[in-house]
Amino acid sequence: MRAATSAALPGRCTSESQASCQGNNSPRGQLHKLHRPQFISQGCYRRSIFPARCLACAAGLTLQIRVRGRRRRRRTSRCCAVNSSPYPEGRYDPSAAAVYFGSRPLQVLGRAVDFAVVGAGFGFKLLLDRQTGRLDANESLRASELTALLVQLGPTFIKIGQALSIRADLLPLAYLQALTELQDSVPPVPTDVADAILETELGKPVGEVFEEISDVPVASASLGQVYRARVREGPEVAVKVQRPGMEERVALDLHLLRESSGLLLQLLSIIAPYTGQDVVGIIDAWGRGFVDELNYLEEAKNADRFMDYISGTPLGAGVCVPPVIQELTTKKVLTTEWVLGNRLEQSSASDVTRLCSLAMNTYMTMMLDMGVLHADPHPGNLLRTPDGKLCILDWGLVTRVDKEIQITLIEHVASLLSRKYERLPDELSRLGFVPEGKEKAVADSEVVLVLASFYSQWTDGGGAANVDVSDFFTELQRLGGKYGDIFRVPPYFFYIARASVVLEGIGLGNDSSYSIVSDCMPYLSQRLVKDRSPRVAAALETFVYGERKDEKDRTVDVGQIQNLTSGFSSYLQSSTGVVDQPAPDLRAKDLVDQLGELLLSEESTPLQDIVVD
């Protein structure tokens, strides 16, 4: 089998690797061992002579960490005796890591020297920019240099760069744009090293498990690399193998970052206008996500949980994930069936626009029904299969959405569509955009006016087609940078933003009139109509009565009723993700049947109450 040349996403079987193999008819040979010197992916370039200042900085940091480590060991001596890894429970644990690395000063010193050597020059340039008043003039240049620096420091920092690329509350826009271009692609480790990991994890020689396997990886990224193989007497599969020693490498980097958080905050204060951030808390949040991502059993569970849930919804007919081969999956090896298909944005099929709509409804179902969100909505993670289904790849990293936020988001959208902008400060606070107690300050700032202006583009003249989602999220980033003490965009929302921008880009590439905002209506409509919980029922009233909701002689907004019916119908259509869709008259019958069931139900429904009213 011939190796793919496209870049891969972080340690996962990506669509780049799969799409590059479509139509590849070259025979897959027997396993061949590669005998090349092992590539060290961390970018830890040892030098014979280090600047004295960097050595002093590294030595000082190491001494500080050793003192803290001794204190922790005295407090947790029983843990120290049994720890054979930085995270003995398999979960991110900064205290256990401190104990573990506290007994390994030379290892800590070596990595601290790397930090100092690579980072000192960048820090000096920032200080010089500030002294000479050229911070703004050199911002784009420094952003590019930071991106290159993170790549040089290795896998942990590539992941951090990707996480930072959505944090407008931490970095200026120029840095966010530069980090968005960060490529997680590194040369693979030799195949014989990967084979050794496979044999250790699976308990058998590679040749006994696989009938054939690619000579070299079809994709290689910072955390792992992917091979295309065929199981003996089984299907063709994608086999992801974790790079050796990744847990310890990631743990050491996070440990050093955590211990040097004060220095990081000082550096951040030069770049960002607002730095009232809990840096240790941010590092810990990254750590939890990174360590979970290193456990391929968790990735398998994420995919299975999603598929189990979505299969019970109307969307299940059109959405799939690569099925996991459980008996060939461990913490360091993930084996899934090989999915044939084309990247959605590269497909020339006529149903790409419909699949974008299906994808948006799926993401909203994940977020607002399941309470989870696929945290890497990248174009390479969306495939169109030959039978017209949407296949979502890469489940290594998901983020949780609190139940309160789920309901508040529904109420928020219903309010903005009804032009009830006076509720914005309170709703933004409950959604995590505004710190508690800062609602009045936000109401008095330009934030509400700017957001109301964008929302009005949706509800007035031309509708959703007038809303440029990318411009909207850029404006949110600007507001977060300018009013960081009273308005900040929460991390979970940036994942929503990224998914929306990606899907809008794909849709516009296929249909110049495509609107991702319009694709929010199908899910919202069916949720408002079907959900009988009191708060969603109240949101339905807000939606259909609009500004007259609280009036005694209120009447429904006919336009909103039409939007509701149209959205509900679109949801039923978008959920049909197969090539042979039902005829229009059958879709209409399905719509009438479902609405009739809600209206004639013996149990009272919010829709019945509105009709009676």
Image: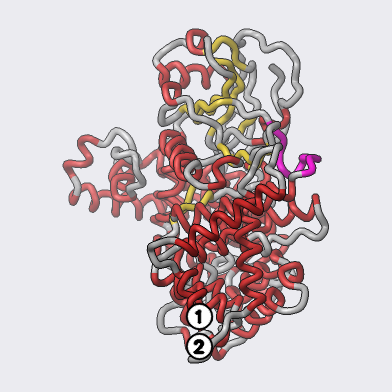
Position of 157 relative to 196 (above/below)? below
Query: Splitting the image into 4 quarters, where does residue 380 fall?
Result: top right
Q: For the point 61% across and 62% down, which residue is it?
A: 124
Q: Secondary structure at mark 2?
A: helix
Position of 605 relative to 54 (above/below)? below
- Residue 184 is situated, as x and y percent measured from the top left of the image, at 62, 42
Any mark on residue 441, and which? 2
Mark count: 2
The three-letter code of the residue at mark 2 reads Ala
Q: Is residue 383 left or right of residue 161?
A: right
The residue segment tinted magenta is: 341-350
Q: Is residue 562 magenta?
A: no
Query: Splitting the image into 4 quarters, where does residue 322 fall?
Result: top right
Does residue 43 appear in the picture of this structure?
A: no
Residue tagged 1: 486
Which sits in the foreground, 343 or 206? 343
Q: For the point 29% across and 38% down, which residue is it?
A: 88
Q: Secondary structure at mark 1?
A: loop
Q: Earlier in the sequence, mark 2 or mark 1?
A: 2
The three-letter code of the residue at mark 1 reads Ile
Q: Disc 2, disc 1: CB below 8 Å?
A: yes
Mark 2: few, some, or many residues within 10 Å (few <14, many ≥20)? Answer: some
Any mark on residue 601, and which? none
Q: Is residue 121 left or right of residue 530?
A: right
Position of 73 relative to 212 (above/below)? below
Which sits in the foreground, 222 or 379? 379
- Residue 515 is situated, as x and y percent measured from the top left of the image, at 73, 61
